[in-house]
Amino acid sequence: MAMTPEAKMQYLFTLRSKGVMDVRTLQAMEKIDRGDFVKGLFAERAYEDMPLPIACGQTISQPSVVGLMTQALNVQPRDKVLEVGTGSGYQAAVLSQLARRVYTVDRYPRLVREAQSVFDRLGIVNITSMSADGSFGLPDQAPFDRILVTAAAEDPPGPLLAQLKTGGIMVLPVGQSDAVQSLIKVTRLENGFDYEELRAVRFVPLVEGMGQE
Ligand code: SAH
């Protein structure tokens, strides 16, 4: 399903009205069609500002939350970015428009396979997708300029903090999985970390180990 110009205008208007103001983020979200990442019954709701179910009992995040997280990450064109929680692949595709390379991992091999086939179909070549437990990060590719976690942990995972470059930024939801969580922005300083709380969010939990599908 291709996005009509009217649907696209409405989509961008909603993003702006929810606080997504960064021009590059809006351009990336204009370019990547969320409809390519939502399948079956829910495809016709792809442009609503709502999370939607995807395979393996997971969800594609709400567009305004994708926009706010992307904006907070402040990705630069030369950046190497790690995303933990590929899910549908939509967030990774948005990041791919802003970064030099995006590594994205999910604990469900099926989600990684399906997302990769959408990247291939769209001709997106700067995303490397892998099935892995992302709470350990990707030691072989570290350090990263930016890290985005799209599943909630109780605290920022130590390996991810360790794999962030000095001056690097990590955005992630923290808190109990069955409660409202906080989206936080962590900046790695010369000696330590700076933490900024952005807003309340609700994400599926970051789960240890690999998924079964
Ligand atoms: N960013 C996604 C939405 C992700 S939903 C999108 O744009 O569609 C959160 C994802 O995190 C789920 O797919 C879930 O399987 C994954 N996840 C949860 N725990 C994980 C872990 N330890 N390692 C990697 N992925 C994990």
Image (cartoon, rainbow, N blue to C red):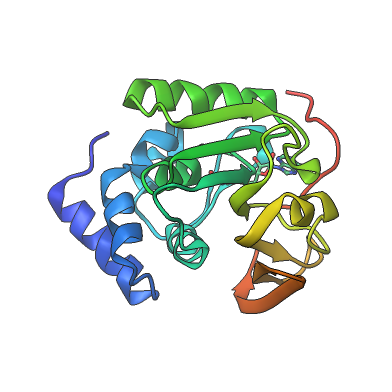
The quarter holding residue 171 reads bottom right
Quadrant for residue 48, please give it.
Answer: bottom left
The image position of residue 126, as x and y in percent, is 44, 31
Kindly identify the residue that appears in the image at 43 percent across and 61 percent down.
67
Left or right position of 128 against 138? left
Name which residue lies at 23% across and 43% down.
3
Quarter holding the N terminus? Answer: top left
Is 190 on the left-hand or right-hand side of 77? right
User: Is the residue 123 above or below the residue 10 in the image?
Assistant: above
Query: On screen, 60 above or below 197?
Result: above
- Outermost residue toward the left? 5
Q: Position of residue 55 (x, y in %)?
A: 60, 32
The foreground one among 10 and 132 is 132
How many numbered dots are placed on residues in this image? 0
Q: Say which quadrant the C terminus sits in.
A: top right
Q: Is residue 173 above or below residue 102?
A: below
Counting from the top left corner in percent of width and height, residue 165 is at 66, 55
Residue 194: percent from left, percent from top: 70, 76
View quadrant of ligand 1: top right
Extreme front residue here?
190
Identify the residue shown where x is 26% and y is 51%: 30
Q: 194 or 196: which is nearer to us?
A: 194
Residue 209 lies left or right of residue 191; in this view the side is: right
Drawn side of residue 45 relative to residue 138, left or right: left
Q: Nearer the viewer, residue 53 or 213?
A: 213
Of residues 174 and 170, the one nearer the viewer is 170
